[in-house]
Image: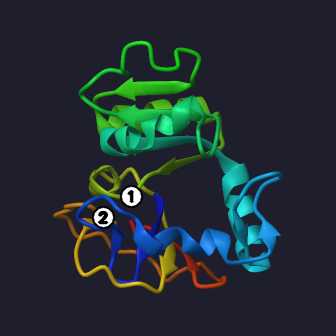
Amino acid sequence: MANVVSVDGYIADDNDDIGPLFDWYFNGDVPLTEGGSFKVSKASADYVRTQWSEVGAMVIGRHLFDIMNGWDGTPPVGDHVVVVSHRPKPAGWHPEASYHFIDDVTQGVTRAQELAAGRTVTIAAGDLGGQALALGLVDEVAMDVVPVVFGSGKRYFGSIDAVCLLEDPHVVIQGNRVLHLRYRVRR
């Protein structure tokens, strides 16, 4: 499970605006990808490149898919995207895209694991991520914490109503205006 998050635990405001959460992608001098517009600190670049290279598939909810228009059929990271939704793929939407629509969280994570073929499966934070965490489908929580306070909005763990304990962070990397944290889920 991974996402950029405010220090008070939000991934967007009440109107789905991410505001300054992603500004750190533009405040460094090291390009994240060849020809891309993201430029971050060296520490962030080393961390993010490693994480992105390990991802084989990602699992997202329909809300994120709709907001981003599925990144126009190109997965932002990894080779496959599983969209957990009770609604099917939009008719005619990028038929060549490796996007799979499944209506159950557990089945969606299982399908993503199959597609990832041994690589990492990342689950987007928010309601879907909280559901996956509560179901015991999350092994690790990754947070890119940005020094901003929203006060309200879309919560990192969605509307989870379960207690889930995390270990002490096993990765702590300070970038420029971002702190990268990774926690294992305590079983």
Q: Quadrant of the C terminus?
A: bottom left
Q: Residues within 10 Å of mark 2 (few under 14, many from 20)?
A: many
Q: Give the residue at mark 2.
A: 157
Measuring from the top left, give residue 29's x and y in whole percent.
80, 75
Q: Which mark is residue 125?
A: 1
Q: Is residue 137 above or below residue 37?
A: above
Callout 1: helix, strand or loop?
loop
Is residue 57 shown left or right of residue 62? right
Residue 49 in the image: above or below residue 25: above
Query: Where is residue 99 drawn, in percent x and y?
Result: 50, 27
Residue in the picture at 63% in, 69% down: 25
Identify which residue, 183 or 71, lies in the foreground.
Answer: 71
How many badges with numbers are in the image? Answer: 2
Q: Amino acid at mark 1?
A: Ala
Q: Quadrant of residue 78?
A: top right
| CB atoms of marks 1 and 2 within 8 Å | yes
Q: Earlier in the sequence, mark 1 or mark 2?
A: 1
Vertical side of 109 occupied by 120: above or below: below
What amino acid is found at the position of numbered circle 2 in the picture?
Answer: Phe
**Is residue 35 rendered to the left or right of residue 140?**
right
Give the label on residue 36, or none. Answer: none
Q: CA distance from mark 1 to mark 2?
A: 6 Å
Which residue is at a point 67% across and 59% down the rendered structure image? 51
